[in-house]
Amino acid sequence: MTGTAVPRGGPVDAAHGRHLLLQMLRVRQLEEKCVELYSAAKIRGFLHVYIGEEAVAAGVMASLAPEDAVVATYREHGHALLRGVSAGAILAEMYGHVEGCCRGRGGSMHLFDAATRFFGGNAIVAGGLPLAVGLALADKMAGRSNVTVCFFGEGAVAEGAFHESLNLAALWQLPVLFCCENNLYAMGTALVRSESQTDIALKAAAYEIPAWAVDGMDVLAVQEAARRAVDAVRSGGGPHFLELRTYRFRAHSMFDPERYRTKEEVARWMERDPIMLLRATLEAAGQLSAADWEQLQADVQAEVAAAVDFAEAGTPEPVEELTRFVYSERGGDEGTDTATRSAAARRRAGKGTGTP
């Protein structure tokens, strides 16, 4: 099936509905804090926030198992958080502190955490798709039942890696779920001005991959579609593709003057804020009280405040450590001091242990 939105199922379980609401609130408040910290020059470099798109990450992550792999794009703070990377480790990474998930070396666009099988954070448009195909190929060759989920924007559709990755995944029937977060503008060019065929799911179907479009502002619809796709992939059904039609409420990045869309358009989309949509659904079903809502917000505010404190108390990496990890460190017998690591690195490079 292609090109049609998947209808939502029956009533959501009250506890699970509140959990999804909490997850989206965690992403929203963390991202709002990132904007605040960036404006205060606490965070530097590039920053791309996920505000408005929270339903996609929350719905898809709710359908995954711990052993599954996740590959994301540079707008990945929300994916990392909901995959299990702590808010503190994420903010410390943006601060450039060693307490960050990548010791402060990756920053906003390169979050990575092997423990949660979160493999980026990739700054190159479409760069994550071949990585996801490789992870899925490894799982298939090893006989594992894992699923690899790959998030990317509709701008990646214009890249050759998109077509190569879908082709190989379909040809080899790999266990990968492609999730296209279609927010209509890529960096700053409307989809209708860059693609002659704007039905992204239809493009995927051309590779004989089951593909369909989903209302990416409705977390319940996203979760239902993701669960259906993940179950099919895990049971040997080969790659699947979801086009998640969503919208970012903020500019592409903190450097974006945002002259390519009108304030009226943004306001119309904000009427479909995924957090407010789920809140209204739960309230209408009598599953969320005003006190419940206030408690959820308070819990998230406390989590984000603690994460800021953790990041603020962090430490920059010493200059003497900057060449560490250029070569992999094998075992614990090589010591941890810089001179010993340098000697070990020279040995691995075939240069002996003497002075270079």
Image (cartoon, grey):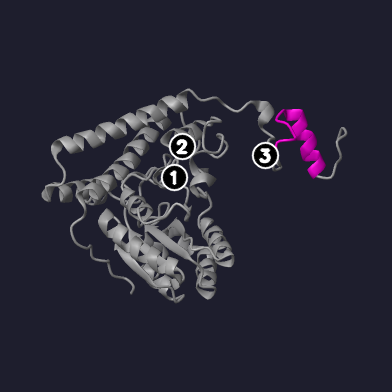
- Classify mark 2: residues with Cα within 10 Å, few (<14), some (14-19) or many (20+): many
Q: Is residue 233 above or below residue 76?
A: below
Tell me which residue sits at (20%, 49%) in the image.
Answer: 14
Distance from the alpha carbon under mark 2 to that under mark 1: 8 Å
- Of pointers 3 and 1, the one earlier in the residue sequence: 1
- Classify mark 3: residues with Cα within 10 Å, few (<14), some (14-19) or many (20+): few
Residue position for label 1: 80
Q: Secondary structure at mark 1?
A: helix
Quick check: 16 left or right of 333?
A: left
Q: Are marks 2 and 3 in contact (CB under 8 Å)?
A: no
Indicate the amino acid at tag 1. Answer: Ala
Q: Are marks 2 and 1 in contact (CB under 8 Å)?
A: yes
Q: Is residue 315 visible?
A: yes
Q: Is residue 264 visible?
A: no
Distance from the alpha carbon under mark 2 to that under mark 3: 20 Å
Residue 112 on the magenta span: no
Q: Secondary structure at mark 3?
A: loop
Q: Is residue 63 above or below residue 305?
A: below
Residue position for label 2: 90
Indicate the amino acid at tag 2. Answer: Ile
Residue 325 image label: 3
Indicate the amino acid at tag 3. Answer: Phe
From which residue to which does the magenta span run? 332-348
Q: Secondary structure at mark 2?
A: helix
Residue 347 on the magenta span: yes
Distance from the alpha carbon under mark 3 to that under mark 1: 22 Å
Q: Could you say where residue 126 lies in the image, as x and y percent from the top left?
A: 51, 58
